Image: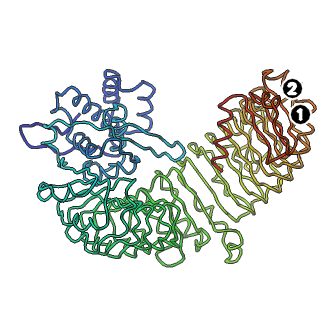
């Protein structure tokens, strides 16, 4: 494998170029060689290696391998020359952070890119592979936590020593200042002659003017606990900071950024998240090297600069959710290198409409399209070209509330032309005003679609045939007040001749684990669930469906562990009553269902003893009653019936089930 190396006797070679599609030209022999290397050094289990080849190209595999080799050389204090220069530079950059410093993975990757440490055409993927390898080795950074819902990862810096030989050859100058006060920076003569990376634990606004004199400063970070001390940036602060590449002012109290920011022409990373800024200066157009602009949760932010379209190097624009922006700046479609765009707010003005997305085919991660009622026509929606954005994993389609849609006359056919690529994993539809959903939402080609939320689509009268989706794991249906019946169409598309299956062959919702129905206040009947349907369903929650009078068969839900029925005031009984409930059930919660509670209580004890562990117990608690000693003893592991919402107590069959319920309440 061709690598650039640290020779210590000559010049450094260029970093290796790993192309995004390099796996296309690889052959079995190359893969066998790499696999042999992983097994020899016991870097990962064979199962994990197979996963790497499934989700990574050869470029990422090589990067992972290189970093493992780098760490091995570091611990043995030998063989420095066989390690790629790129790995050493990334390692040295990580050493600039103080011990126990916490940072999210996306930010750390963007910081590595800001120093031009990764020269490949897909630096984000290569950097992510490096971080995975560093975490595996555990001497430099550790994985603090991972949010599987969002895909975000947080890391903690462990703190380590870099050999002098490596520092001397690194393109990252190791001079750094980590201080409680800026005084050590201000008196350090090195700061005037070498590139400087500054991390301050305490900084007052009056000290910023002095820091602005250090023309060699490349990084300025303020630690999280002390950012509130900064409430403004001096007007001329950036006049001499031509070498500044990284500036993190997030969580400070600043309300504006001075126009002198235009002088920081080398700036590649700018984070103003959770500040009070209302606007950015138009001089931001001078930041032609800017790659990352973070504006997460800026509650007073009114608009992005008109010059945003000129930031043609921008790859990551994160707006978060808490801000007052009404539309995107005109011409944002010029930012064709964008890989992260957390939200696109559709406007009606020229240059602000949804067709600006046409050429942004590198967009990945999560994208929210909001104010979709402003889409002018079907041609505009089609030209947005969502179907070509194969890196998108999560998509939210959001309209404004129904009353406003009726007022302006929204064309509800627009959603049919917003079909995403089949690589999508998570779909959320909010306040859609049409009566039916497009056919693409339940198409069999969406083999990666795992999570769907449909929220407050009040005019919807027929649910899409989501049972056809082969990989759907979580489904939430909330405030769909137009739904009266859930029938066989929910399982499969009965109107499509090509989707006809024999009942003994078709399995609806083959991978679904969690199903939530909430505030579907006009739902009366849920029927037509087949005997082999929902084989993996573990959690079923039906809340505030006040007209629900008939429920589908639950007997064949062989994996069901948690069942909650809440405020289903007209539900007279469970299907076949309790005697035929699935034996996998561990937790049953019935709350504010007066007819159902009375019906179940008469045979609950017999059912528990015959179908489940005798340790389980069902009881009904009267409103306002205090739990006595005998009652408390029954709660050790039981199934609960409760009529009082305020006084209901939930006891579960094991601690895991209790946590299941707690996590659900926290998420609401």
**Residue 627 placement: quadrant:** top right
Distance of label 2 from label 1 (alpha carbons): 9 Å
**Which residue matches tag 2?**
607
Asked which secondary structure carries label 2, the reply is helix
As drawn, the residue found furthest toward the left would be 9
Query: Which mark, residue 577?
Result: 1
> Badge 1, how many Cα within 10 Å: few under 14, some, many 20+?
some
Decide which of 194, 504 is in the foreground and name it.
194
Query: Which mark, residue 156?
Result: none
Does 288 sit left or right of 334 as displayed?
A: left
Q: Position of residue 130 (x, y in %)?
A: 32, 39
Image quarter (top left, top right, bottom left or bottom right) of the N terminus: top left
Residue depicted at 92% across the width and 39% down the height: 598
Asked which secondary structure carries label 1, the reply is loop
Between circles 2 and 1, the one closer to the viewer is: 2
Q: Earlier in the sequence, mark 2 or mark 1?
A: 1
Does 102 sit left or right of 626 as displayed?
A: left
Decide which of 152, 201 is in the foreground and name it.
201
Q: Is residue 301 above or below residue 361?
A: below
Q: Position of residue 463 (x, y in %)?
A: 74, 53
Does 221 sit left or right of 518 as displayed?
A: left
Q: Position of residue 382 (x, y in %)?
A: 55, 65
Q: Are marks 2 and 1 in contact (CB under 8 Å)?
A: yes
Residue depicted at 29% across the width and 31% down the height: 68
Decide which of 22, 213 is in the foreground and name it.
213
Q: Position of residue 117 (x, y in %)?
A: 25, 48
> Badge 2, how many Cα within 10 Å: few under 14, some, many 20+?
some
The colour scheme used to paint the residues is rainbow
């Amino acid at each position: 494998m061709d690598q650039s190396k640290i020779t210590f006797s000559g010049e450094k070679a260029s970093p290796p170029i790993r192309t995004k599609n390099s796996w296309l030209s690889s052959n079995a022999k190359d893969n066998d060689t790499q696999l042999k290397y992983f097994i020899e050094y016991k870097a990962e289990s064979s199962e994990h290696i197979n996963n790497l080849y499934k989700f990574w190209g050869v470029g990422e595999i090589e990067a992972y391998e290189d970093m493992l080799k780098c760490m091995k050389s570091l611990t043995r204090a030998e063989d420095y020359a066989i390690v790629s220069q790129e790995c050493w530079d990334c390692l040295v950059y990580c050493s600039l952070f103080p011990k126990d410093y916490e940072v999210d993975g996306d930010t750390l990757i963007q910081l590595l890119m800001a120093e031009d440490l990764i020269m490949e055409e897909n630096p984000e993927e290569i950097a992510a592979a490096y971080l995975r390898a560093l975490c595996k080795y555990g001497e430099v950074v550790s994985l603090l936590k991972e949010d599987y819902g969002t895909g975000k990862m947080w890391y903690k810096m462990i703190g380590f020593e870099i050999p002098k030989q490596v520092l001397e050859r690194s393109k990252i100058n190791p001079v750094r200042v980590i201080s409680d006060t800026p005084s050590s920076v201000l008196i350090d003569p090195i700061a005037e002659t070498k590139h400087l990376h500054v991390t301050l634990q305490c900084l007052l606004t009056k000290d910023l003017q002095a820091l602005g004199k250090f023309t060699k400063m490349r990084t300025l970070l303020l630690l999280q606990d002390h950012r509130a001390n900064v409430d403004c940036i001096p007007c001329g602060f950036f006049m001499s900071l031509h070498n500044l590449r990284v500036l993190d002012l997030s969580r400070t109290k600043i309300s504006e950024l001075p126009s002198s920011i235009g002088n920081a022409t080398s700036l590649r990373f700018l984070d103003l998240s959770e500040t009070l800024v209302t606007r950015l200066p138009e001089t931001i157009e001078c930041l032609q090297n800017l790659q990352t602009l973070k504006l997460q949760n800026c509650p007073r932010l009114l608009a992005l600069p008109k010059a945003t379209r000129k930031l043609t190097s921008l790859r990551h624009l994160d707006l978060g959710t808490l801000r007052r922006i009404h539309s995107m700046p005109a011409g944002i479609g010029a930012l064709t290198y964008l890989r992260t765009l957390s939200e696109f707010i559709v406007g009606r003005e020229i240059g602000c409409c949804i067709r600006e997305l046409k050429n942004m085919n590198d967009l990945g991660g999560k994208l929210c399209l909001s104010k979709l009622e402003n889409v002018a026509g079907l041609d505009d929606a089609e030209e947005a070209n969502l179907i070509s954005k194969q890196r998108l994993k999560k998509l939210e389609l959001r309209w404004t509330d129904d009353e406003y849609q009726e007022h302006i006359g929204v064309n509800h056919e627009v959603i049919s032309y917003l079909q995403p690529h089949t690589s999508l994993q998570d779909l959320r539809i909010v306040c859609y005003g049409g009566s039916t959903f497009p056919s693409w939402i339940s198409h069999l080609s969406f083999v990666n679609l795992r999570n769907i939320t449909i929220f407050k689509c009040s005019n919807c009268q027929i649910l899409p045939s989501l049972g056809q989706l082969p990989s759907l794991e979580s489904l939430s249906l909330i405030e769909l007040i137009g739904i009266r019946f859930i029938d066989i169409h929910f399982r499969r598309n009965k109107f499509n001749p090509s989707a006809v299956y024999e009942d003994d062959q078709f399995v609806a919702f083959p991978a679904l684990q969690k199903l939530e129905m909430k505030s579907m206040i006009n739902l009366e009947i849920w029927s037509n669930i087949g005997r082999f349907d929902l084989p993996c369903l573990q959690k079923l929650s039906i809340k505030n469906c006040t007209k629900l009078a008939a429920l589908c068969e639950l007997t064949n839900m062989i994996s069901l562990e948690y069942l909650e029925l809440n405020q289903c005031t007209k539900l007279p009984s469970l299907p076949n009553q309790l005697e035929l409930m699935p034996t996998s059930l561990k937790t049953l919660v019935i709350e504010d269902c007066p007819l159902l509670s009375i019906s179940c209580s008469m045979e609950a004890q017999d059912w528990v003893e015959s179908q489940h562990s005798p340790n389980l117990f069902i009881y009904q608690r009267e409103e306002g009653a205090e739990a006595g000693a005998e009652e408390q003893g029954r709660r050790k592991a039981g199934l609960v019936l409760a009529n009082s919402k305020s006084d209901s107590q939930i006891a579960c069959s094991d601690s895991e089930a209790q946590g299941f319920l707690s996590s659900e309440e926290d998420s609401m």
